[in-house]
Image: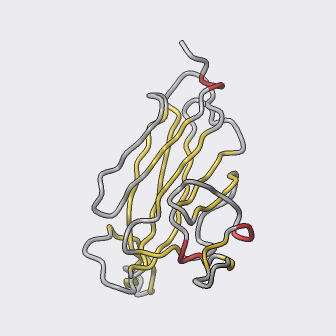
Amino acid sequence: MMNVRQLTKVLTFLLLALPVTALAANDIRFTSTAEIEVQQVNIKGEKVVVRQPATLLQPGQIAIYTNSFTNVGQQPASNVVINNPVPANTEYLGGSATETGFDVVFSTDKGKSFGKPTELTVPDGKGGKRPAEPKEYTNIRWTMQALLKPGATGVVEFRVRVK
């Protein structure tokens, strides 16, 4: 049996009308959700923002993608990596990927290469390159910086705007 500490966990999420696909050992259980924020009035008459499932989004709407995971194994998990494509017909909103406890990098070439925002470039249409804009990111990859203990959970999320 492979030592969980030596196993790299790769979780791939395809969201918004695409089936969730995961490539991971059986000891990491996860869920993915796509939600929107709406303003409601609570019992006290106060305006509050609540999240609701995202359905039939219109251009300009913002969706929040949340990936939750739990180590259901008996050993701590190391090298937990979550690779999430930015859903088709959306654009990533810069600065919205959660970072606490994770090293976060992005891709502009559908996950072939990754880098920090200051390292990413795209063709400028004139034979050269220019800095990439967040709306041009195609993938987000989180690498957990600590062990995920048995029974421990984690969450990463990001926001997109529907094109």
In the displayed structure image, the side of residue 147 where residue 51 appears, left or right: left
* Outermost left residue: 56
For residue 3, above or below residue 11 = above
Residue appearing at x 41%, y 42% in the figure: 22
Q: The C terminus lies in which quarter of the figure?
A: bottom left
Residue 134 falls in image quadrant: bottom right
How far across and down, in percent of the image, does residue 80 sit?
60, 40
> Which of 3/49 is in front?
3
| Residue at the front extreme, as displayed | 127
Q: Up-down: is 120 above or below 71?
A: below
- Relative depth, front residue between 157 and 72: 157
**x then y, percent, for residue 148:** 63, 36
Q: Left or right: where does residue 160 sit relative to residue 88? A: right
Task: State which quadrant residue 89 falls in.
Answer: bottom left
Q: How is the image coloured?
A: secondary structure
Q: Position of residue 157 (x, y in %)?
A: 53, 61
The relative height of residue 13 versus residue 36 in the rendered view (above or below) is above
- In this view, the residue farthest toward the top is 1
* Residue at image location 34% in from the left, 70% down from the top: 52
Residue 105 placement, left or right of 49: right
* Horizontal and vertical percent position of residue 84: 49, 55
